[in-house]
Amino acid sequence: MARTSAAAANADLQTGALPRASIDEWLAGEPQRTSDLSGDRERFSAFWHDAGELIEKLPPKPGRNPAQAQAAQAIHRRTREARELFLRAHAAAVYSAVTHRMTRFVRVEDLLFAAAEAFPCLTPTRAQIVAETDTAQRDKDGLETDQGILISHILGQDRAGLHLCHAMLLPHPRTPAALATFAAKGVLDLGAVRLERRGRAVHLTMSNPRFLNAEDQTTIDAMEIGVDVATLDSASDIAVLRGGVVDHPKYRGRRIFGSGINLTHLYRGKVPFVWFLTRELGFVHKFLRGVAKPDALPDDVHGVGIEKPWVAAVETFAIGGHCQILLTMDYVLAANDAYLTLPARKEGIVPGAANLRLPRFTGDRIARQAIQYERKLICDSPEGRLICDEIAPADAMDAAIERIVTGLTSSGAVGAVGNRRAFRVAQEPLDEFRRYCAVYAREQAYCHFSPALIDNLERFWNAQNRAE
Protein backbone atom coordinates (compact mmCIF):
# COMPACT_ATOMS: atom_id res chain seq x y z
CA MET A 1 0.00 0.00 0.00
CA ALA A 2 1.52 3.32 -1.08
CA ARG A 3 1.59 5.94 1.65
CA THR A 4 -0.62 8.98 1.30
CA SER A 5 1.41 12.17 1.04
CA ALA A 6 1.28 14.64 3.91
CA ALA A 7 -0.30 17.21 1.60
CA ALA A 8 -3.04 14.79 0.56
CA ALA A 9 -3.65 13.80 4.19
CA ASN A 10 -3.99 17.44 5.18
CA ALA A 11 -6.41 18.10 2.32
CA ASP A 12 -8.65 15.22 3.42
CA LEU A 13 -8.50 16.26 7.07
CA GLN A 14 -8.89 20.02 6.72
CA THR A 15 -12.64 19.88 6.21
CA GLY A 16 -13.58 21.86 9.30
CA ALA A 17 -14.74 18.70 11.04
CA LEU A 18 -11.83 18.77 13.50
CA PRO A 19 -9.69 21.58 14.95
CA ARG A 20 -6.74 22.31 12.69
CA ALA A 21 -4.35 22.42 15.64
CA SER A 22 -5.36 18.90 16.70
CA ILE A 23 -4.81 17.59 13.19
CA ASP A 24 -1.43 19.25 12.85
CA GLU A 25 -0.30 17.95 16.23
CA TRP A 26 -1.38 14.41 15.34
CA LEU A 27 0.34 14.40 11.95
CA ALA A 28 3.52 15.81 13.49
CA GLY A 29 3.78 12.66 15.61
CA GLU A 30 3.43 10.28 12.66
CA PRO A 31 6.33 7.80 12.50
CA GLN A 32 8.05 8.03 9.13
CA ARG A 33 10.29 4.98 9.43
CA THR A 34 10.85 1.97 11.64
CA SER A 35 13.74 1.15 13.96
CA ASP A 36 13.87 -1.20 16.95
CA LEU A 37 10.70 -2.99 18.12
CA SER A 38 10.57 -1.44 21.58
CA GLY A 39 10.87 2.12 20.33
CA ASP A 40 8.47 1.53 17.46
CA ARG A 41 5.88 0.00 19.74
CA GLU A 42 5.85 3.19 21.82
CA ARG A 43 5.88 5.64 18.90
CA PHE A 44 3.36 3.86 16.69
CA SER A 45 1.02 3.06 19.58
CA ALA A 46 0.98 6.73 20.55
CA PHE A 47 0.13 7.71 16.98
CA TRP A 48 -2.71 5.17 16.78
CA HIS A 49 -4.00 6.14 20.22
CA ASP A 50 -4.13 9.82 19.28
CA ALA A 51 -5.95 8.91 16.08
CA GLY A 52 -8.58 7.17 18.17
CA GLU A 53 -9.02 10.30 20.26
CA LEU A 54 -9.56 12.34 17.10
CA ILE A 55 -12.24 9.88 15.94
CA GLU A 56 -13.95 10.16 19.33
CA LYS A 57 -14.33 13.92 18.77
CA LEU A 58 -16.56 13.11 15.81
CA PRO A 59 -20.14 11.87 16.08
CA PRO A 60 -20.72 8.11 15.72
CA LYS A 61 -20.62 7.01 12.09
CA PRO A 62 -24.39 7.19 11.38
CA GLY A 63 -24.52 10.82 12.53
CA ARG A 64 -21.55 12.20 10.59
CA ASN A 65 -22.01 14.81 7.89
CA PRO A 66 -19.96 14.47 4.67
CA ALA A 67 -17.04 16.53 6.03
CA GLN A 68 -16.90 14.49 9.21
CA ALA A 69 -17.12 11.22 7.28
CA GLN A 70 -14.26 12.36 5.04
CA ALA A 71 -12.14 13.23 8.04
CA ALA A 72 -12.78 9.86 9.70
CA GLN A 73 -11.90 7.99 6.52
CA ALA A 74 -8.67 9.98 6.19
CA ILE A 75 -7.67 9.18 9.78
CA HIS A 76 -8.36 5.47 9.32
CA ARG A 77 -6.46 5.43 6.05
CA ARG A 78 -3.44 7.15 7.59
CA THR A 79 -3.34 4.87 10.64
CA ARG A 80 -3.59 1.77 8.45
CA GLU A 81 -0.69 2.94 6.34
CA ALA A 82 1.27 3.21 9.60
CA ARG A 83 0.21 -0.32 10.57
CA GLU A 84 1.45 -1.63 7.24
CA LEU A 85 4.79 0.12 7.82
CA PHE A 86 5.09 -1.24 11.37
CA LEU A 87 4.14 -4.80 10.42
CA ARG A 88 6.42 -4.97 7.40
CA ALA A 89 9.24 -4.57 9.90
CA HIS A 90 7.85 -6.36 12.95
CA ALA A 91 5.15 -8.93 12.05
CA ALA A 92 7.37 -11.88 12.94
CA ALA A 93 8.34 -10.25 16.25
CA VAL A 94 4.70 -9.52 17.11
CA TYR A 95 3.78 -13.15 16.51
CA SER A 96 6.78 -14.36 18.47
CA ALA A 97 5.84 -12.19 21.44
CA VAL A 98 2.22 -13.31 21.52
CA THR A 99 3.08 -17.02 21.14
CA HIS A 100 6.09 -16.96 23.51
CA ARG A 101 8.58 -17.51 20.68
CA MET A 102 6.24 -19.98 19.02
CA THR A 103 6.25 -22.31 22.01
CA ARG A 104 2.46 -21.90 22.32
CA PHE A 105 -0.29 -22.42 19.79
CA VAL A 106 -2.79 -19.55 19.85
CA ARG A 107 -5.97 -19.65 17.79
CA VAL A 108 -6.55 -16.69 15.52
CA GLU A 109 -9.53 -15.35 17.47
CA ASP A 110 -7.41 -15.26 20.64
CA LEU A 111 -4.27 -14.10 18.88
CA LEU A 112 -5.91 -10.87 17.76
CA PHE A 113 -6.82 -9.80 21.29
CA ALA A 114 -3.49 -10.93 22.70
CA ALA A 115 -1.78 -8.72 20.12
CA ALA A 116 -3.99 -5.79 21.15
CA GLU A 117 -2.79 -6.20 24.74
CA ALA A 118 0.90 -6.63 23.90
CA PHE A 119 0.98 -3.89 21.26
CA PRO A 120 -1.58 -1.24 22.22
CA CYS A 121 -3.80 0.05 19.41
CA LEU A 122 -2.29 -2.31 16.82
CA THR A 123 -5.66 -4.09 16.69
CA PRO A 124 -8.96 -3.37 18.44
CA THR A 125 -9.41 -4.63 21.98
CA ARG A 126 -12.04 -7.13 23.02
CA ALA A 127 -14.00 -4.29 24.66
CA GLN A 128 -14.03 -2.30 21.41
CA ILE A 129 -15.38 -5.29 19.47
CA VAL A 130 -18.01 -6.06 22.11
CA ALA A 131 -19.15 -2.42 22.02
CA GLU A 132 -20.08 -2.85 18.34
CA THR A 133 -21.80 -6.21 18.74
CA ASP A 134 -25.30 -4.81 18.26
CA THR A 135 -24.29 -2.29 15.61
CA ALA A 136 -25.51 -2.73 12.03
CA GLN A 137 -22.73 -3.45 9.56
CA ARG A 138 -23.20 -0.14 7.74
CA ASP A 139 -22.79 1.78 11.02
CA LYS A 140 -19.51 0.17 12.13
CA ASP A 141 -16.27 2.12 11.84
CA GLY A 142 -14.41 -0.90 10.45
CA LEU A 143 -12.02 -1.35 13.37
CA GLU A 144 -11.73 -5.04 12.52
CA THR A 145 -9.99 -4.12 9.28
CA ASP A 146 -6.86 -3.78 11.40
CA GLN A 147 -7.23 -7.44 12.38
CA GLY A 148 -7.07 -8.42 8.72
CA ILE A 149 -3.93 -6.34 8.20
CA LEU A 150 -2.21 -8.04 11.14
CA ILE A 151 -3.15 -11.59 10.12
CA SER A 152 -2.17 -10.89 6.53
CA HIS A 153 1.33 -9.90 7.63
CA ILE A 154 1.64 -12.90 9.97
CA LEU A 155 0.53 -15.35 7.29
CA GLY A 156 2.93 -13.63 4.92
CA GLN A 157 5.82 -14.75 7.15
CA ASP A 158 7.08 -18.27 6.41
CA ARG A 159 7.60 -19.58 9.95
CA ALA A 160 4.97 -17.53 11.74
CA GLY A 161 2.38 -18.15 9.04
CA LEU A 162 2.89 -21.92 9.04
CA HIS A 163 2.80 -21.95 12.84
CA LEU A 164 -0.56 -20.14 12.81
CA CYS A 165 -1.93 -22.57 10.19
CA HIS A 166 -0.76 -25.42 12.43
CA ALA A 167 -2.50 -23.86 15.45
CA MET A 168 -5.79 -23.65 13.57
CA LEU A 169 -5.59 -27.29 12.46
CA LEU A 170 -5.34 -28.53 16.04
CA PRO A 171 -8.55 -29.76 17.69
CA HIS A 172 -10.95 -27.08 18.89
CA PRO A 173 -10.71 -26.59 22.69
CA ARG A 174 -14.18 -28.13 23.12
CA THR A 175 -13.47 -31.15 20.92
CA PRO A 176 -12.12 -33.59 23.57
CA ALA A 177 -15.36 -33.55 25.58
CA ALA A 178 -17.49 -33.85 22.44
CA LEU A 179 -15.34 -36.72 21.14
CA ALA A 180 -15.74 -38.60 24.43
CA THR A 181 -19.52 -38.28 24.21
CA PHE A 182 -19.57 -39.45 20.61
CA ALA A 183 -17.27 -42.39 21.33
CA ALA A 184 -19.62 -43.54 24.08
CA LYS A 185 -22.95 -42.99 22.34
CA GLY A 186 -22.27 -42.97 18.59
CA VAL A 187 -24.40 -39.84 18.26
CA LEU A 188 -23.76 -36.19 19.08
CA ASP A 189 -26.07 -33.18 18.86
CA LEU A 190 -24.26 -29.84 18.72
CA GLY A 191 -27.30 -27.85 17.63
CA ALA A 192 -26.12 -26.60 14.27
CA VAL A 193 -24.41 -29.95 13.64
CA ARG A 194 -25.54 -33.50 14.32
CA LEU A 195 -23.28 -36.57 14.06
CA GLU A 196 -24.21 -40.22 13.86
CA ARG A 197 -22.05 -43.27 13.31
CA ARG A 198 -23.52 -45.75 10.85
CA GLY A 199 -21.33 -48.78 10.42
CA ARG A 200 -17.85 -47.56 9.54
CA ALA A 201 -19.08 -44.10 8.46
CA VAL A 202 -19.72 -40.90 10.41
CA HIS A 203 -22.59 -38.81 9.06
CA LEU A 204 -22.36 -35.08 9.79
CA THR A 205 -25.57 -33.16 9.16
CA MET A 206 -25.51 -29.36 8.97
CA SER A 207 -28.65 -27.76 10.39
CA ASN A 208 -29.75 -24.13 10.46
CA PRO A 209 -33.30 -24.74 9.19
CA ARG A 210 -34.69 -21.24 9.52
CA PHE A 211 -31.94 -19.83 7.28
CA LEU A 212 -31.69 -22.62 4.68
CA ASN A 213 -28.73 -24.13 6.57
CA ALA A 214 -26.73 -20.91 6.20
CA GLU A 215 -23.48 -20.40 8.10
CA ASP A 216 -23.12 -17.68 10.72
CA GLN A 217 -21.72 -16.98 14.18
CA THR A 218 -24.16 -19.51 15.69
CA THR A 219 -22.80 -22.37 13.55
CA ILE A 220 -19.04 -21.81 13.34
CA ASP A 221 -17.92 -23.57 16.54
CA ALA A 222 -20.32 -26.48 16.08
CA MET A 223 -19.02 -27.05 12.57
CA GLU A 224 -15.39 -27.15 13.64
CA ILE A 225 -16.06 -29.40 16.62
CA GLY A 226 -18.18 -31.66 14.42
CA VAL A 227 -15.47 -31.94 11.77
CA ASP A 228 -12.91 -32.67 14.50
CA VAL A 229 -15.05 -35.41 16.03
CA ALA A 230 -15.85 -37.01 12.67
CA THR A 231 -12.16 -36.96 11.74
CA LEU A 232 -10.82 -38.20 15.07
CA ASP A 233 -13.41 -40.94 15.61
CA SER A 234 -11.38 -44.13 15.62
CA ALA A 235 -14.40 -46.38 15.02
CA SER A 236 -15.04 -45.05 11.49
CA ASP A 237 -13.14 -44.93 8.22
CA ILE A 238 -15.05 -42.30 6.24
CA ALA A 239 -17.19 -39.21 6.84
CA VAL A 240 -20.34 -38.07 5.02
CA LEU A 241 -21.39 -34.40 4.93
CA ARG A 242 -25.04 -33.59 4.27
CA GLY A 243 -27.50 -30.75 4.79
CA GLY A 244 -30.52 -31.21 7.04
CA VAL A 245 -34.23 -30.72 6.36
CA VAL A 246 -35.30 -27.06 6.49
CA ASP A 247 -38.54 -25.39 7.56
CA HIS A 248 -38.44 -22.41 5.17
CA PRO A 249 -41.89 -22.14 3.51
CA LYS A 250 -40.48 -22.44 -0.01
CA TYR A 251 -38.46 -25.57 0.74
CA ARG A 252 -40.23 -27.01 3.78
CA GLY A 253 -39.48 -30.70 4.27
CA ARG A 254 -36.57 -30.75 1.82
CA ARG A 255 -32.91 -31.31 2.49
CA ILE A 256 -30.64 -28.42 1.48
CA PHE A 257 -26.88 -28.72 1.45
CA GLY A 258 -26.51 -25.05 2.34
CA SER A 259 -27.04 -21.44 1.31
CA GLY A 260 -23.63 -20.03 2.24
CA ILE A 261 -23.13 -17.17 4.66
CA ASN A 262 -26.20 -15.85 6.47
CA LEU A 263 -26.60 -12.58 4.56
CA THR A 264 -29.24 -11.26 6.94
CA HIS A 265 -26.87 -11.65 9.87
CA LEU A 266 -24.05 -10.17 7.80
CA TYR A 267 -26.13 -7.08 7.05
CA ARG A 268 -27.15 -6.74 10.70
CA GLY A 269 -23.51 -6.76 11.80
CA LYS A 270 -23.73 -10.16 13.50
CA VAL A 271 -20.87 -11.74 11.53
CA PRO A 272 -17.54 -10.44 12.87
CA PHE A 273 -14.58 -10.28 10.54
CA VAL A 274 -12.66 -12.94 12.48
CA TRP A 275 -15.45 -15.38 11.52
CA PHE A 276 -14.02 -15.54 8.00
CA LEU A 277 -10.53 -16.32 9.28
CA THR A 278 -11.72 -18.89 11.81
CA ARG A 279 -13.77 -20.62 9.13
CA GLU A 280 -11.12 -20.73 6.41
CA LEU A 281 -8.17 -21.61 8.62
CA GLY A 282 -10.32 -23.91 10.76
CA PHE A 283 -12.95 -26.42 9.71
CA VAL A 284 -12.82 -25.82 5.95
CA HIS A 285 -9.07 -26.41 5.98
CA LYS A 286 -9.59 -29.49 8.17
CA PHE A 287 -11.86 -31.01 5.53
CA LEU A 288 -8.92 -30.81 3.15
CA ARG A 289 -5.95 -31.54 5.43
CA GLY A 290 -7.31 -33.29 8.51
CA VAL A 291 -6.68 -32.55 12.19
CA ALA A 292 -3.10 -31.80 13.20
CA LYS A 293 -1.03 -33.05 16.11
CA PRO A 294 0.95 -30.56 18.21
CA ASP A 295 4.32 -32.21 17.60
CA ALA A 296 4.40 -32.22 13.80
CA LEU A 297 3.74 -29.57 11.16
CA PRO A 298 0.97 -30.92 8.89
CA ASP A 299 2.95 -30.28 5.71
CA ASP A 300 2.03 -33.61 4.01
CA VAL A 301 5.66 -34.47 3.28
CA HIS A 302 7.01 -34.94 6.81
CA GLY A 303 4.12 -34.17 9.14
CA VAL A 304 1.42 -36.70 9.89
CA GLY A 305 -2.04 -35.51 10.84
CA ILE A 306 -5.24 -37.46 11.39
CA GLU A 307 -7.64 -37.58 8.49
CA LYS A 308 -10.17 -39.62 6.59
CA PRO A 309 -11.97 -39.33 3.25
CA TRP A 310 -15.02 -37.05 3.05
CA VAL A 311 -18.10 -37.55 0.87
CA ALA A 312 -20.50 -34.64 0.29
CA ALA A 313 -24.14 -35.27 -0.60
CA VAL A 314 -25.57 -32.18 -2.33
CA GLU A 315 -29.33 -31.74 -2.34
CA THR A 316 -31.30 -28.77 -3.71
CA PHE A 317 -28.34 -26.38 -3.84
CA ALA A 318 -24.89 -25.51 -2.53
CA ILE A 319 -24.52 -21.74 -2.57
CA GLY A 320 -21.50 -19.61 -1.68
CA GLY A 321 -19.59 -21.07 1.25
CA HIS A 322 -21.27 -24.43 0.83
CA CYS A 323 -20.08 -24.59 -2.75
CA GLN A 324 -16.59 -23.72 -1.46
CA ILE A 325 -16.75 -26.73 0.87
CA LEU A 326 -17.26 -29.07 -2.08
CA LEU A 327 -13.79 -28.12 -3.35
CA THR A 328 -12.26 -29.83 -0.30
CA MET A 329 -14.19 -33.08 -0.60
CA ASP A 330 -12.87 -36.45 -1.83
CA TYR A 331 -16.15 -37.39 -3.52
CA VAL A 332 -19.21 -35.30 -4.36
CA LEU A 333 -22.60 -36.90 -4.93
CA ALA A 334 -25.35 -34.58 -6.14
CA ALA A 335 -29.06 -34.92 -6.70
CA ASN A 336 -30.13 -34.54 -10.31
CA ASP A 337 -32.12 -31.38 -9.50
CA ALA A 338 -29.37 -29.63 -7.52
CA TYR A 339 -27.23 -26.66 -8.53
CA LEU A 340 -24.14 -24.72 -7.40
CA THR A 341 -23.43 -20.98 -7.28
CA LEU A 342 -20.72 -18.67 -5.93
CA PRO A 343 -22.45 -15.25 -5.85
CA ALA A 344 -19.39 -13.35 -4.66
CA ARG A 345 -20.07 -10.32 -6.86
CA LYS A 346 -23.58 -9.88 -5.49
CA GLU A 347 -22.26 -10.13 -1.94
CA GLY A 348 -19.15 -8.00 -2.39
CA ILE A 349 -16.83 -10.40 -0.57
CA VAL A 350 -14.08 -12.86 -1.48
CA PRO A 351 -15.46 -16.44 -1.59
CA GLY A 352 -13.03 -18.06 0.83
CA ALA A 353 -10.44 -20.21 -0.91
CA ALA A 354 -12.59 -20.74 -3.99
CA ASN A 355 -10.27 -18.51 -6.05
CA LEU A 356 -7.43 -20.87 -5.11
CA ARG A 357 -9.26 -24.18 -5.61
CA LEU A 358 -12.01 -23.78 -8.18
CA PRO A 359 -9.74 -23.30 -11.24
CA ARG A 360 -8.21 -26.74 -10.78
CA PHE A 361 -11.72 -28.24 -11.07
CA THR A 362 -13.30 -26.17 -13.82
CA GLY A 363 -10.41 -24.32 -15.44
CA ASP A 364 -9.75 -20.62 -15.11
CA ARG A 365 -12.50 -19.22 -17.35
CA ILE A 366 -15.44 -21.06 -15.77
CA ALA A 367 -14.03 -20.27 -12.32
CA ARG A 368 -13.92 -16.56 -13.11
CA GLN A 369 -17.43 -16.68 -14.58
CA ALA A 370 -18.76 -18.42 -11.46
CA ILE A 371 -17.06 -16.05 -8.99
CA GLN A 372 -17.20 -12.74 -10.85
CA TYR A 373 -20.29 -13.13 -13.05
CA GLU A 374 -22.56 -15.42 -10.99
CA ARG A 375 -22.51 -18.30 -13.44
CA LYS A 376 -24.88 -21.00 -12.15
CA LEU A 377 -23.63 -24.55 -12.44
CA ILE A 378 -26.32 -27.20 -12.75
CA CYS A 379 -24.93 -30.30 -11.07
CA ASP A 380 -26.20 -32.58 -13.82
CA SER A 381 -24.43 -30.71 -16.62
CA PRO A 382 -20.98 -30.98 -18.22
CA GLU A 383 -19.75 -28.02 -16.15
CA GLY A 384 -21.38 -29.24 -12.94
CA ARG A 385 -19.81 -32.67 -13.37
CA LEU A 386 -16.39 -31.05 -13.20
CA ILE A 387 -17.14 -30.64 -9.48
CA CYS A 388 -19.67 -33.42 -8.87
CA ASP A 389 -18.41 -36.99 -9.23
CA GLU A 390 -21.82 -38.63 -9.45
CA ILE A 391 -25.43 -37.66 -10.04
CA ALA A 392 -28.32 -39.59 -8.49
CA PRO A 393 -32.10 -39.17 -8.60
CA ALA A 394 -33.21 -36.84 -5.84
CA ASP A 395 -35.39 -39.54 -4.30
CA ALA A 396 -32.57 -42.10 -4.30
CA MET A 397 -29.86 -40.19 -2.42
CA ASP A 398 -29.92 -42.37 0.70
CA ALA A 399 -29.22 -45.52 -1.28
CA ALA A 400 -26.56 -43.77 -3.36
CA ILE A 401 -24.74 -42.58 -0.22
CA GLU A 402 -24.66 -46.10 1.23
CA ARG A 403 -23.38 -47.54 -2.03
CA ILE A 404 -20.61 -44.92 -2.30
CA VAL A 405 -19.52 -45.39 1.31
CA THR A 406 -19.29 -49.15 0.76
CA GLY A 407 -17.33 -48.70 -2.45
CA LEU A 408 -14.85 -46.19 -1.02
CA THR A 409 -14.11 -48.27 2.08
CA SER A 410 -14.04 -51.75 0.55
CA SER A 411 -10.24 -51.66 0.24
CA GLY A 412 -9.60 -50.06 3.63
CA ALA A 413 -8.84 -46.50 4.67
CA VAL A 414 -5.03 -46.49 4.49
CA GLY A 415 -4.78 -46.19 0.72
CA ALA A 416 -7.48 -43.52 0.58
CA VAL A 417 -5.68 -41.34 3.12
CA GLY A 418 -2.33 -41.84 1.39
CA ASN A 419 -3.81 -40.77 -1.92
CA ARG A 420 -5.38 -37.69 -0.34
CA ARG A 421 -1.97 -36.58 0.88
CA ALA A 422 -0.35 -37.30 -2.47
CA PHE A 423 -2.91 -35.16 -4.28
CA ARG A 424 -2.35 -32.29 -1.82
CA VAL A 425 1.42 -32.33 -2.28
CA ALA A 426 0.90 -31.67 -5.97
CA GLN A 427 -2.19 -29.45 -5.82
CA GLU A 428 -2.22 -27.40 -2.62
CA PRO A 429 0.84 -27.67 -0.37
CA LEU A 430 0.48 -25.99 3.00
CA ASP A 431 2.77 -23.13 2.05
CA GLU A 432 0.63 -22.28 -0.97
CA PHE A 433 -2.46 -22.22 1.23
CA ARG A 434 -0.66 -19.95 3.70
CA ARG A 435 0.30 -17.46 0.99
CA TYR A 436 -3.22 -17.41 -0.40
CA CYS A 437 -4.71 -16.75 3.03
CA ALA A 438 -2.28 -13.88 3.58
CA VAL A 439 -3.91 -12.13 0.62
CA TYR A 440 -7.39 -13.27 1.62
CA ALA A 441 -7.11 -11.84 5.15
CA ARG A 442 -6.41 -8.31 3.96
CA GLU A 443 -8.78 -8.27 0.98
CA GLN A 444 -11.68 -9.76 2.92
CA ALA A 445 -11.20 -7.23 5.71
CA TYR A 446 -11.59 -4.31 3.34
CA CYS A 447 -14.53 -5.99 1.56
CA HIS A 448 -16.26 -6.68 4.87
CA PHE A 449 -16.45 -2.97 5.68
CA SER A 450 -16.89 -1.61 2.19
CA PRO A 451 -19.95 0.55 1.41
CA ALA A 452 -20.34 -1.67 -1.66
CA LEU A 453 -21.14 -4.63 0.62
CA ILE A 454 -24.14 -2.83 2.10
CA ASP A 455 -25.25 -1.60 -1.31
CA ASN A 456 -25.04 -5.12 -2.76
CA LEU A 457 -26.98 -6.66 0.12
CA GLU A 458 -29.74 -4.07 -0.22
CA ARG A 459 -29.95 -4.28 -4.00
CA PHE A 460 -29.67 -8.01 -4.50
CA TRP A 461 -30.88 -9.39 -1.17
CA ASN A 462 -33.39 -6.78 0.06
CA ALA A 463 -31.53 -7.17 3.35
CA GLN A 464 -33.00 -4.10 5.00
CA ASN A 465 -36.48 -5.64 4.89
CA ARG A 466 -35.65 -9.17 6.01
CA ALA A 467 -36.49 -10.33 9.50
CA GLU A 468 -33.75 -11.64 11.74
Image (cartoon, rainbow, N blue to C red):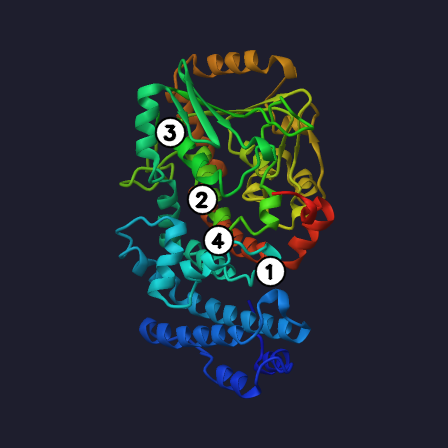
Left or right placement of residue 342 versus residue 144 in this view: right
Q: For the residue marked with disc 4, what is the amino acid?
A: Ala
**Residue position for label 4:** 438
State which tag comes first along the sequence, 4 or 3: 3
Residue 23 drawn above or below residue 137 = below
Give the number of the mark in front: 1 or 2.
Answer: 1
Q: Give whichever of discs 1 and 2 has the lower sequence position.
A: 1
Which numbered disc, 3 or 2, marks the residue that appears first in the sequence? 3
Mark 1 residue type: Asp
Q: Amino acid at mark 2?
A: Leu
Residue at 29%, 40% in the rendered image: 296
Disc 3: which residue: 229
Q: Which mark is residue 139?
A: 1
Residue 225, percent across and down? 40, 34
Few, some or many C-alpha atoms within 10 Å of disc 3 (few <14, some 14-19, many ≥20)? many
Label 4 – label 3 distance at C-alpha: 28 Å
Relative vertical location of residue 347 with respect to residue 226 in this rendering, above or below? below
Q: Residues within 10 Å of mark 4 (few under 14, many from 20)?
A: many
Question: Disc 3 versus disc 2: distance between alpha carbons?
Answer: 17 Å
Question: Alpha carbon of mark 2 to alpha carbon of mark 4: how far?
Answer: 11 Å
Pick the front one: 294 or 301: 294
Residue 50, image x and y in percent? Answer: 46, 77
Give the percent coordinates (x, y) of residue 252. Answer: 64, 24
Disc 2, SS:
helix
Disc 2 packing (10 Å; few <14; some 14–19; many ≥20): many
Task: Tell me which label, 3 or 1, sits earlier in the chain.
Answer: 1
Amino acid of disc 3: Val
Q: Measure the C-alpha gap from mark 1 to mark 2.
A: 28 Å
Mark linked to residue 281: 2
> Given this view, does label 3 or label 2 mark the residue nearer the observer?
3
Q: Secondary structure at mark 4?
A: helix
